Image (cartoon, rainbow, N blue to C red):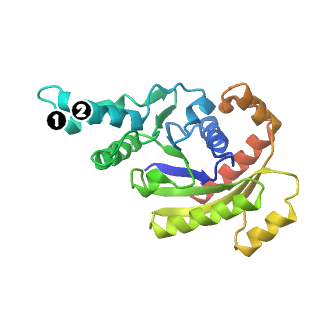
Amino acid sequence: MSVSIAVAGKGGSGKTSLASLIIRYLKKNNKSPILAIDADPNANLGESLGLGVRQTVGSAIASFNEEKIRIPQGMTKEAYLEYRLNEVLVESKGLDLVTMGRGEGPGCYCYPNLLLRKFIDTLSANYSYIVMDNEAGMEHLSRRTTQNVNELLLISDHSVKGVRTVTRIRELVSELKLVVARQSVVINFAPPRLDTAVTEELARLGMEPIATIPFDETVMDYDLKLKPLPELPDTSPAVAAVNDLMAKLLGKN
């Protein structure tokens, strides 16, 4: 059975970078095959992984809605949509990527939503690990277009606003009755010592981070130069911290 790891947090908290470093850990530790799902409408996981994305699920569905009157003779609407969705998959050695993208056009996700979930669930069965990069609103989780989640990592940057966003995501998970086995808080871009305002807010909200990921200029440099983050050296402080986090999480499974 696949292990599903989802990453969520406010914009700018470094979710995509962390998702990429999680994938780096899995590949380095022979945990392939891996399916990466970019479920953030501001899609850039592919760039972070060094994978080119030609189209998204959103654009494929929008195109399907425009073309459905021209579905090839003898082909059902379901079969044709599945064919279009399979074109979205970006394949590489040990790692494949699906980019969800935005719902493009009115009612874009209405009819195909059930088929989209079936597509993702069928696809996921072929992988040992699924790593999903989400927006704070977790649109695709709330639409039930993705599998149950084993590990939900709630990412905050080193700020009170980031910590409060984590609280709102936890409340959203509860309100939507999402099936999440375990939630863990991670502080990203952390200095050597957390600011008192951040630690006091964490204490007030009853949250204890499972990990702090240090601010790492190497990660920033790779991002600026559009170099794939899985190629970061083992000497990277962020890589070392994410490796420790993953060893801790997978050791608990």
**Residue 210 seen in the figure:** no
Residue 152 or residue 9, whichever sits in front: 9
Contact check, label 2 and label 1, Cβ < 8 Å: yes
User: Which residue lies at the image location 44% right of the left edge and 57% below the top edge?
Assistant: 142
What amino acid type is highlighted by mark number 2? Tyr
Element class at badge 1: loop
> Extreme left residue here?
74
- In x, y percent, where is residue 150? 51, 57
User: Which residue lies at the image location 80% right of the left edge and 33% below the top edge?
Assistant: 218
Position of the C terminus, as image quadrant, is: bottom right
Q: Is residue 154 left or right of residue 58?
A: right
> Which dot marks residue 76?
1
Question: Does residue 9 sit above or below 178 in this rendering?
Answer: above
Residue 16 or residue 251, whichever sits in front: 16
> Which dot marks residue 80?
2
Determine crowd level at label 1: few under 14, some 14-19, many 20+ residues with C-alpha closer than 10 A.
few
Question: Does residue 166 sit above or below 120 in this rendering?
Answer: below
User: Which residue lies at the image location 77% right of the left edge and 35% below the top edge?
Assistant: 220
Question: Does residue 123 sit above or below 197 in this rendering?
Answer: above
What amino acid type is highlighted by mark number 1? Thr
